[in-house]
Image (cartoon, grey):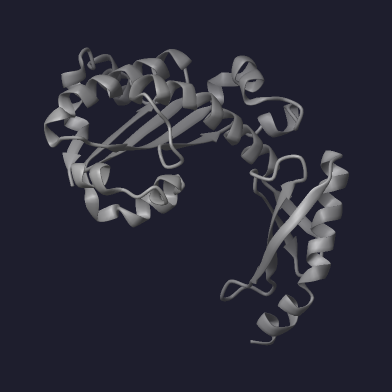
């Protein structure tokens, strides 16, 4: 109990250590947003988890971990920067398929081989890394779609088929596509305020209004997955990955 009283009281020291570490490591100014202290049950020491953002990019949240003795341990700036670039890039794909984009439309996560973090730095873009080391990259795509009618799923499978063909030619090591389809009531009644929700907040709020979920994964290292991909010749072949909620 002492730890959860004492260490939060001196969190400003951890925040200062985090700010200095980030600014020295990346050569730019950072703004500290908030910090929390945690000590998992059974561990001898705890750590601070501090959210920040580059001063030049307030929308990009960077998390840094700092030990209780005020030593920075890790940060996710590279991951978050490259993920943000991929999400912006994917926006044109989503818009082509569905006509428009709102905040809750999609979210894309990305993973890289370990060597990417030593070979590349903050000055490299996602596209540069993709073009040079794309064999080890994986994409996980989450999307929300509002239905006008539950009878239009055949058309939506055509869109998913087009998306999978796009991902296929990217020659990724693996990818996952998960699309949640919400009933027509949401499309009719959603408020202007809720249209501004981000992907996670929207998904949590309208969890019970999902009619269908599409989920498909591909792994280039798995022979069964490769064969399954090769068997997908038409949009109708994707029905096996669609289930009613």
Q: Single out the residue that lies furthest toward the left.
A: 151
- Compared across the picture, whether 242 is left or right of 133 comes to left
Picture quadrant of residue 19:
bottom right
Q: Is residue 220 visible?
A: no
In this picture, is 210 found above or below 136? below
Residue 210 vs residue 232, the one in the foreground: 210
Image x and y of residue 127, in percent = 62, 20
Is residue 180 something that shows in the picture? yes
Q: Residue at x 22, y 32 (%)?
A: 241
Question: How far across and down, in percent of the image, does residue 155 sit?
Answer: 20, 22
User: Residue 87 appears at what percent x and percent y?
Assistant: 53, 31
Q: Is residue 18 shown left or right of residue 165?
A: right
Nearest to the observer: residue 14 or residue 135: 14
Q: Is residue 193 above or below residue 159?
A: below
Q: Is 4 placed above or below 107 here?
A: below
Q: Residue at x 47, y 16 (%)?
A: 170
């Amino acid at each position: 109990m002492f730890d959860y009283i004492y260490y939060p009281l001196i969190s400003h020291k951890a925040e200062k250590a985090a700010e200095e570490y980030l600014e020295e490591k990346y050569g730019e100014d950072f703004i500290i947003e908030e910090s929390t202290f945690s000590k998992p049950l059974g561990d001898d020491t705890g750590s601070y988890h501090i959210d920040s953002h580059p001063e030049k990019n307030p929308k990009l949240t960077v998390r840094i971990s700092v030990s209780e003795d005020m030593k920075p341990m890790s940060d996710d700036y590279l991951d978050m920067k490259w993920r943000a670039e991929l999400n912006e890039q994917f926006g044109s794909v989503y818009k082509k398929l569905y006509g428009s984009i709102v905040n809750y439309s999609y979210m894309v996560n990305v993973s890289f081989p370990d060597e990417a973090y030593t070979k590349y730095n903050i000055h490299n873009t996602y596209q540069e890394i993709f073009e040079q080391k794309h064999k080890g990259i994986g994409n996980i795509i989450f999307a929300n779609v509002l239905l006008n009618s539950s009878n239009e799923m055949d058309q939506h499978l055509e869109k998913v088929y087009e998306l999978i063909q796009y991902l296929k030619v990217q020659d990724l090591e693996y990818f996952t596509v998960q699309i949640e389809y919400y009933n027509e009531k949401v499309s009719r009644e959603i408020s202007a305020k809720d249209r501004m929700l981000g992907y996670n907040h929207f998904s949590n709020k309208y969890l019970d209004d999902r009619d269908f979920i599409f989920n498909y994964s591909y792994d280039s290292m798995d022979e069964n997955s490769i064969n399954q991909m090769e068997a997908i010749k038409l949009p109708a072949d994707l029905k096996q990955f669609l289930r009613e909620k």
